[in-house]
Image (spheres, rainbow, N blue to C red):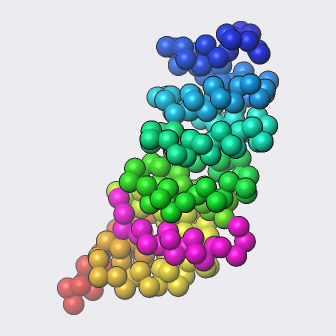
Amino acid sequence: MIPIGSAHLLDALRARNSSTRLEAALAAGTHPEAAFVTALVQRCAVEPDFFVRDMLTWALTRQPPEDTVPALLTELRSDRAQARSQALHTLSKIGEGSAWPAITRSLLRDADDEVARSAWRAAVVLVPAGQEEALATELGAQLGRGDRDVQRSLSRALVALGDVVEPVLQARSLSGDPAVRAHARATEVLLGDPEAGFDSVIEEAKRLVALGSEG
């Protein structure tokens, strides 16, 4: 058992054994203290184990938001991609609307796919009422980006915004880029049927785009 409220817990977050780090993150979330925030945020930036990162995020959601949110916003300016990505992910879990101004265009278009995907998810959660259309336009500008996983994430973010994305998808389905057209059309299908599988939908959209371009 890791002693709570001591330097031992903070040391355990840096232990070589991932199970020890996982236990430390669990303890920090089970017995939240503002003193843990800095160490948890710093560990998120470098933690290699997915399950430990997930527990670190959970632990941060258990800390006082007035301490956690400012620390996470600082991480959004980090040169380390994982720091930005994990901070965005955690902000989406906390859901504090005051973080919205920090979800900048540069983060939504970050060159690192994982950072961009986290930014898309956070933006959909944090977007204030009345700004959904602007966000849909910004996300729609990236249709066709990346591999299958990246495109799936973008489609899910757009679908989560609801009907406001329809004009964006219709416009992008007329793009001169076949990848953009296919992605837009696949997202239109998902908007009507969110339970549809992305892989089958995108393949069908690519097929239809190819047939159309041949005609």
Tell me where residue 192 appears, x and y as whole percent.
Answer: 56, 76
Q: Vertical placement of 128 versus 171: above or below?
A: above
Image quarter (top left, top right, bottom left or bottom right) of the N terminus: top right
Q: Vertical placement of 122 versus 186: above or below?
A: above
Q: Is residue 177 magenta?
A: no
Q: In this view of the protein, which residue sits in the foreground, 97 or 167? A: 97
**Residue 68 as seen in the image, left or right of residue 141:** right
Tell me where residue 34 appears, x and y as whole percent.
Answer: 77, 29
Residue at the spot 44% in from the left edge and 85% down from the top edge: 171
**Residue 152 as seen in the image, left or right of residue 210:** right
Q: How many marks?
A: 0
Q: Tell me which segment is drawn in magenta.
A: 128-146
Residue at the spot 62% in from the left edge and 70% down from the top edge: 161
Residue at the spot 48% in from the left edge and 79% down from the top edge: 169
Quick check: can you spot residue 169? yes
Tell me where residue 163 appears, x and y as whole percent.
Answer: 62, 79
Q: Vertical placement of 190 versus 94: above or below?
A: below
Q: Is residue 135 magenta?
A: yes
Q: Vertical placement of 147 versus 61: above or below?
A: below
Q: In this view of the protein, which residue sits in the foreground, 150 or 12? A: 12
Residue at the spot 60% in from the left edge and 42% down from the top edge: 74
Picture quadrant where residue 215 is located = bottom left
